[in-house]
Amino acid sequence: MAKIPVKLVVDTAKLHGPKVIKFAKDNEKIILAAIPSVAAGAKKLKEIRDNKKEVDSKEHLRKKRFAEYKQTEFNTQNKVHLLKSKHEIENFILQIMTEEERELAFKKPVHSKRIKNWNSILIQLEDQMAVLDYEEYLKIYNNPKCESSYFEGMERHIEKYKRLIEEDNTEELVNFIHTQTKRDIKAIEKDFL
């Protein structure tokens, strides 16, 4: 709320106060009849403001989640949680893109900045997933009996990976790891073969 200088308020009251009091005395009946309408209007304005606050709090969900994601350490979470986060971020980006299409062109820079910010979080998340995936695949490759808490909830995926290890098909194994981690094939061959 803007701060109004006290001197300005006092000067305005001195200048216009007598005119307002004279007007109120001359039109007393009209003013008394208008008071219920003014009260109803004030009540309606309060309802509109309250509804706007509810809508604003819903719209600020993305803003709250963005602040949370900026503070999140992705390297402590398991794969299922990281995938959930990835899908949520992708949905937020789609929402912003949809809003950008619906709204006026002068808001485009605001939306573009939001999309850029969310994309930076998404890139960090995907990079962290690739690193953690690679580390866990390497652990399992070196010890197939290793139980990974990172892959908890992704048992079928790990069974497929372990089957590739057992089949000793190096080409498929390297392609699987490359697809999952986006690592260079030569680096994968060096670490896994």
Image (cartoon, rainbow, N blue to C red):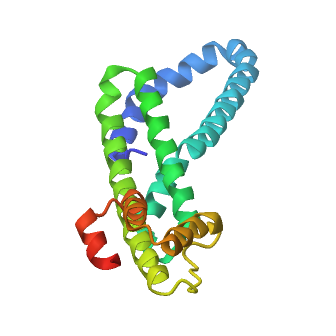
- Which quadrant is the N terminus positioned in? top left
Position of residue 158 relative to residue 175, above or below, is below
* Left or right: 83 in relation to 1: right
Q: Is residue 111 above or below residue 180?
A: above
Quarter of the image that includes the C terminus: bottom left
Outermost residue, left direction? 186
* Residue at 56% across, 86% down: 146
* Camera-side residue of 191 and 61: 191
At x 55%, y 49%, the residue is: 61
In this view, the residue in front, 50 or 139, is 139
Along the horizontal axis of the image, is 77 left or right of 33? left
Quadrant assignment, res 75: bottom left
Query: Against 75, is 120 above or below?
Result: above
Q: Locate residue 85, reporting x and y percent.
A: 52, 57
State the image coordinates of residue 62 (x, y, percent, origin top left).
50, 48
Q: Which residue lies at the image location 37% right of the left edge and 62% below the top edge?
A: 171
Q: Is residue 192 visible?
A: yes
